[in-house]
Image (cartoon, helix red, strand yellow):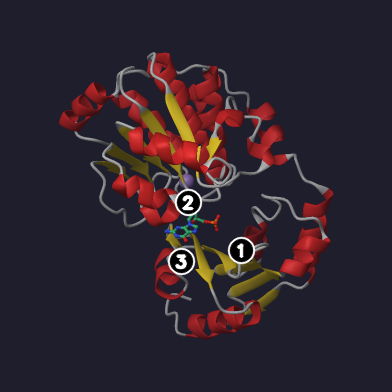
Amino acid sequence: MFTPAELLEINKLLTPEHKIVILTHYNPDGDAIGSSLGLKHYLKTKGIHAEVIVPNDFPKFLKWMPEAKKVLIADYKRKVASDLIYEADVIFCLDFNAPSRIGILGDWLTNSRAKKILIDHHQQPEKFDFVYSNTVIPATCQMVYHFIEAMNDENLVNNDIAECLYTGIMTDTGGFRFRSTSATTHRIIANLIEHGADPAMITSNTWDTNTVSRLHLLALILGRIEVVKDGKVAVLYLTREELKEYGFQKGDTEGFVNYGLSILGVKMAAFFMEDLYEDFIKISFRSKDDMDVNQFSRKYFNGGGHINAAGGKSYESLQGTIETFKVKIEGEESL
Ligand code: 5GP
Ligand code: MN
């Protein structure tokens, strides 16, 4: 948590006179949108307006969240987004810890004179004016809750805040399953339910939203899943042609990589997908135990993230990327 002195300073910055912006990462997920909107709703209870800005669009299954439709998508409204960032007095940076994770917004953030406040749970944070970084907390949404507690404002948690924070904790813990899910996480979840979060509604709106295209894509990749390195590494992939053929929509492949990790004996799963528009391969890594995919992705695939969940990018062809990957995992001692 921020130090008491930092909390005092932050408290002074949070006034209705100040222009406040909340930013989150490229390809926003449930935790990114949940923490940003949760914080926005919290500030609103104190009479403070904040603008949530994201680099690019996010999946439909997150758009039910209170005020999700008011999130400013910089891809569609570049000028408005850059003006807001340059004019801001305070910028909250949620669920990412390096300007390179927010695309074009990264330069604007770096050049903005605003005070920058980081709340994030990824590995190896860069420099910000105020840093609340904790890599063993499963979701940034949980950290936003701790921030509200530290501000002595738990009594302000309302239905909107509760729904948003619940969603991000639920998605980033894979439904309260991943390793960093703790008793504290569950206590906070209990508080959020008491403040109005409805687990059945949130689960159904977020997860019972399969499109036929998603299920067809899933069937396709499961049908050709490959296990290498003595059964310890699962490899999944999708080509651009396939994405087009099946009518891919944003979010359709969310969670696919976890099927690889669910195979008995597998310690690491990698999912390679050609980007629909640009010439690069988006990679998702997941792992178990001490196989550190944050380090692995930083070292070989221009990425990073958490120890057991990370992303990366490759500018080789799809087949070339998969070949390179297979070579790199041969040298991995923790596998
Ligand atoms: P995903 O595979 O779901 O895209 O990403 C898994 C985790 O790694 C998420 O927490 C995400 O924020 C993070 N991540 C994804 N891509 C990158 C990247 O290129 N760099 C860094 N530092 N983190 C990433
Ligand atoms: Mn997160």
Tell which circle, 3 or 2, labels the residue nearer the N-terminal end: 2
Q: Secondary structure at mark 3?
A: helix
The quarter of the image holding the N terminus is: top left
Distance from mark 1 CB to nearest ligand 1 atom below 8 Å: no
Q: Residue at x 60, y 44 (%)?
A: 57
Tell which circle, 2 or 1, labels the residue nearer the N-terminal end: 2
Mark 1 against mark 3, which lies toward the viewer?
Answer: 3
Tell which circle, 1 or 3, labels the residue nearer the N-terminal end: 1
Residue 238 image point, x, y percent: 71, 68
Q: Residue at x 53, y 73 (%)?
A: 314
Q: Give the residue pinned by disc 3.
A: 293
Horizontal side, residue 128 vs residue 215: left or right: left
Residue 312 image point, x, y percent: 50, 65
Determine whether 48 is above or below 36 in the image. Answer: above
Q: Secondary structure at mark 1?
A: helix
Instruction: Tell me which corner region of the image, top left, top right, bottom left or bottom right, holds residue 256.
Output: bottom right
Q: How many C-alpha atoms fall within 10 Å of the one at disc 3: few (<14), some, or many (≥20)?
A: many
Residue 58 image point, x, y percent: 61, 44
Q: At label 3, which amino acid type do we have?
A: Val
Horizontal side, residue 19 vs residue 78: left or right: left
Q: Give the residue pinned by disc 1.
A: 261
Q: At label 2, which amino acid type do we have?
A: Arg
Q: Give the residue pinned by disc 2.
A: 179
Distance, label 3 to label 2, CA atoms, is: 15 Å
